[in-house]
Amino acid sequence: MSSIARLPKKDRQTRLVQSLQENPFATDEDLAELFQVSIQTIRLDRLELGIPELRERIKSVAEKSLDPVKSLGIDEVIGEIIDLQLDSQAISVLEIKEEHVFSRTQIARGHYIFAQANSLAVAVINADVALTATARIRFVRPARLGEKLVAKALVRSRNGDECKVRVETKVQGELVFTATFRVVGMSAVT
């Protein structure tokens, strides 16, 4: 969406609500840039309209997701799952923080990006246990401190207990990582 000329407060707030319905993951910074106002103005508008901060919006979207994770404990997934439809698709968000980056370059360590994608590929499988058999990965560009990685998993095919899952990870719509996983689902081992 292109930037919007300065709007009267009431119009801006109406558009703010519409914008967040279309993209609940927009940050206050993104919205301030879009509406050409200060971040504080956006925060005041959200407060006045009763719109929660980004973290709470993400949790709200996650609570509405259709299916619970079956193959992993929710705390074993890297990133926050915000959508999950077993054997179909899933989305998770991971904010790159200090503990995820090399201190000298502020670039995210690759194993965190891979772990987000891999755990999402396993979580999307409708099985008591799901294990990664193979992974074909490609790092497209480095992720940096402060960026939010949005990983989307799509189950491409299923052959018996074996699924092919494609994961694309993006930052603000720009591709940073892709992977195709072969995941095998099985019954719980007792």
Image (spheres, helix red, strand yellow):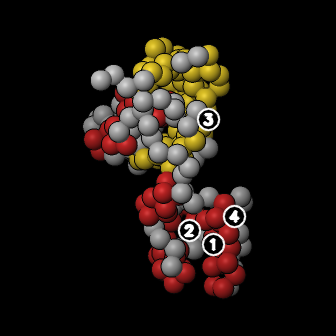
Q: Nearer the viewer, mark 3 or mark 1?
A: 3
Amino acid type of the residue that numbered disc 3 sits on in the rendered structure: Ser
Determine whether label 3 and label 4 are within 8 Å by CB: no
The x and y percentages for residue 70 are 44, 37
Q: Nearer the viewer, mark 3 or mark 4?
A: 3
| Distance of label 1 from label 4 (alpha carbons) | 16 Å
Depicted 130 relative to depicted 56: above or below: above
| Mark identifier at residue 17 | 1
| Mark identifier at residue 3 | 4
The x and y percentages for residue 16 are 63, 72
* Helix, strand or loop status at disc 2: helix
Which residue does the numbered mark 2 point to in the structure image? 32
The x and y percentages for residue 170 are 56, 39
Q: Residue at x 30, y 34 (%)?
A: 102
Q: Residue furthest top?
A: 134
Occupied quadrant, residue 30: bottom right
Q: Residue at x 51, y 84 (%)?
A: 48
- Labels 3 and 4: the sequence-earlier one: 4
Determine whether label 3 and label 1 are within 8 Å by CB: no
Amino acid type of the residue that numbered disc 2 sits on in the rendered structure: Ala
Please tell me how crowded label 1 is: few (under 14), some (14-19), or many (20+) other residues with Cα within 10 Å: some
Occupied quadrant, residue 129: top left
| Distance of label 3 from label 2 (alpha carbons) | 35 Å
The x and y percentages for residue 41 are 51, 78
- Labels 3 and 2: the sequence-earlier one: 2
